[in-house]
Image (cartoon, rainbow, N blue to C red):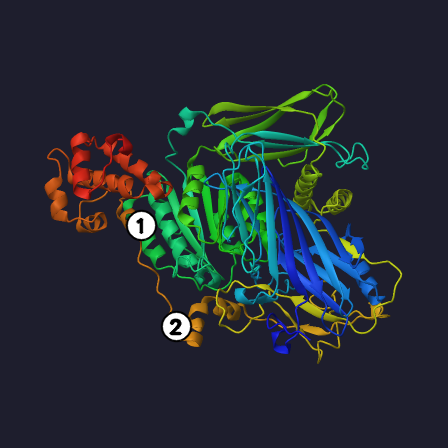
Amino acid sequence: MENCHCGLLTANKEPVPLKSVEVQVEVRDHVATVISTLNYENKEDKPLEAVFVFPMPGDAAVCHFSATIGQKQIVGEVKEKQEAREEYDDALSSGRQAFLLEESDQSPDIFSMSVGSLRPGESASIRLEYVTELAVQADDGLRFCLPAVLNPRYEPIGSEGPGVRVTSVPASQVPYSLSFSARVSSPRPVPKVESNCPLDPLQYLNVEQTQAAVKLSAGHKFDRDVELLIYYKDAHQPTALVEAGQSSAKPGSLMGDPALMLSLYPEFPKDLMSSVASCGEFVFLLDRSGSMDLPTTSTGQQKGVTRISSARDTLLLLVKSLPMGCYFNIYSFGSSYEHIFPKSVAYSQETIEDALKKVEQMEAGMGGTEILAPLKHIYKQSCVPSQPRQLFVFTDGEVSNTKEVLNLVRKNSGSHRCFSFGIGEGASTALINGLAKEGGGHAQFITGADRMQPKAMQSLRFALQPAVVGVAVKWDLPQKVSVNVLSPPITALFQGQRSLIYAQLTGESPEAAKGCVTVKYSLAGHPSENKLHFSLKPTEDGGLTVHRLAARTLIRSLETEEGEEGGGVKEKVVEVSVQSGVSSAFTAFIAVNKADGEEIQGPLVRRNVPIRMMSMCCARPPIAYACCPPPVMMASSPGMFGALRSKSSSWSPDRVVSKGLKKNSKKTLFSQALVADEALVAVEAREDSFDSEITGDVVPKEPPRNPLLQLVRLQQACGCWKLDPALATVLGTTSKEMEKSKPANVKKDGWATILALAWLHGFQMDAKDEWELLAMKAVQWLRAEKTPCGAECVEKGNALLGCNVKKEDLRL
């Protein structure tokens, strides 16, 4: 018997039944259809149940689930969750094969798949299909992520129910391989596709380069998230797609009528966007839990850079880029929380110096990830009059009470905008995207070798844009056509960012009929509008992608209402989910092999399929992470019992099923052991020191701060720099040389500021997105001080610094 040394069952040297994962992705414009095939094989001498807990994009619409055993395919159906669980247990108790796929009750980006049961020597292929939208990144690339990492979700003390049991191993010990290919098609050319994993060369499928294919290089282990960045020419063009309904569905139903997806990119008047806001209350909330001490990347790049150190540098850049006249405060949290000021303070040299000294001392290791308490404290603080509140949240996104957090943000959405940042692989997409969606802001993910700073600065630019109010959508359609909008009302619009609207179209329209949608809003007191004209002719080959995304949007909206209104909403969610074949929090996919055949005999052995843990170390012994409280098996041998589902829990960690066993006679064979979160955090926060004890290696210290951040640190709150030795060191010169080269009619601070700007434009243009806002602040200061900034100043600056900057480059 083959033994696979990995996962929760490592001590017993039992094999892992998942052998390989095959993924095919079809990207059409900004929507992806993902088909995953999971290949299982039972090499044991007992019948087997395999359980796989895995991450999923939080906004994905799971729309197909089937199993193939031999020549027979068993297609799953969507049913009410408890009904599906009971049918699964009944099937296994009766000696039949069954397959169950369900979404976690705690978070929509975690799924569990149960494969039961596989006879000795038997193989099965599980096919899972979902559709998802692609988010636009700061550089206009569309991001697709196939999650491989499921970090343990911290469960605060007192939260309800046992969490999800996650079997995790180090990256190098993930026992199954990944085959991944993608096909991209768009009305516009596809100049490039990039990835955090090695790719074969991009293959164009037509001369227009609007269709392309790409795949991962051979031999890739599924040991990290797979991220694709897809670039289109003219990516910000608004689009509309009408998809024909399902012929077998009832006319008038969501699946029977045509569905519409609008992708809008609002264009704001240039005169209103030429200057940024000079006010606002900026509240920064930084995660300091144990996992923030992990490296930012698992690929060996940026050695020594941890999540917390990157977040500290980002806070420095953000605080220095804030406008004079604003207010700010900084919170940090773990199992408890802290704030630098009792309440938000006016932005001044004194307050930012005080704040940044404390930021530089911030370390990880504050315990678990309890984000709810600091959010409640922030919302209890009175808003500063005439200073719109902007909340920036930085977290690795590992919490189990996602829905409770999002409900709180939703209730307070009228008082602020929320900008969220998911740090590292495994950050919860449901939490990060949900914070931004419910808070009317924008979400960013920092993974692999990404630098946090440019993404944070893009969000700050959004925050400094005037708030759009009074958003209204007006439809102009043929007389016999009506529209039922399925998306929640648009609450946030940002220049250059996409807004999606899903709708159901009813009625009949002529073949060449056209429609028009107008988005009206008020920006800085000025009424504005954007229009999009589109054809009502449905596409016939959409594969119901738009319908499924529309159904997912409606389901998520109803699930939100369920938390607020209660009765009757769950039934609506189940109805839409079953009708559309799209999973929800209240439904699950169930597939049962009902073919006549030999019943499966003997006790059923459970095997948990491991997934990669957040640790980057391979030398450490395998560790099984679990959310608190984890189950502890009381049976003497895992081979004697299968796993027992507790009907009252969201997912049963363990369940006993064997031929002829009645549901009512099932007994719980495990007790709940409360494991202090500090123990888990200690593992996370001390990984590097543990590694050094095992290998004898010296843990690398954080690299010295780069010159750009040193220059940023020296800028004054008003925007100027001081002519002092610290500045001279960053610029590669001396105080004496700076004094000597200073034009006679320019004051010291003005000359220092001109030199700093010349250095930025001469040597840091690759990082312009990071320093552009503080450079604007410096230029405004020079103008306010009426500093002479003629050609002589620029020439002398070039001569001193050894660069070749033009006066017009500095916007002086």
Picture disc at residue 470: none
Q: Residue at x 74, y 63 (%)?
A: 123
Secondary structure of the residue carrying tag 2 is loop
Q: Which residue is mark 2?
A: 697
Which amino acid type is shown beneath numbered disc 2?
Asp
For the residues carrying marks 1 and 2, which lies nearer the camera in this image? Answer: 2
Q: Residue 601's quadrant in the figure? A: bottom right
Position of the N terminus by quadrant: bottom right
The tag earlier along the polypeptide, 1 or 2, is 2
Q: In the image as oriented, which residue stretches furthest toward the front?
A: 207
Q: Pinpoint residue 511: horizontal percent, then vertical percent.
A: 73, 21
Position of the C terminus by quadrant: top left
Closer to the camera, 243 or 363?
243
Q: Residue 309's quadrant in the figure? A: bottom left
Q: Is residue 239 visible?
A: yes
Q: Residue at x 19, y 43 (%)?
A: 801
- Mark 2 Cα within 10 Å, few/some/many (few <14, many 20+)? few
745 versus 413 height, above or below: above
119 versus 388 height, above or below: below
Closer to the camera, 289 or 638?
638
Q: Pinpoint residue 49: horizontal percent, then vertical percent.
A: 74, 67
Q: Pinpoint residue 109: horizontal percent, then vertical percent.
A: 62, 52
Closer to the camera, 14 or 344?
14
345 versus 86 height, above or below: above
Kindly report the distance in space between the C-alpha atoms of the residues bearing marks 1 and 2. 29 Å
Q: Which residue is mark 1?
A: 709
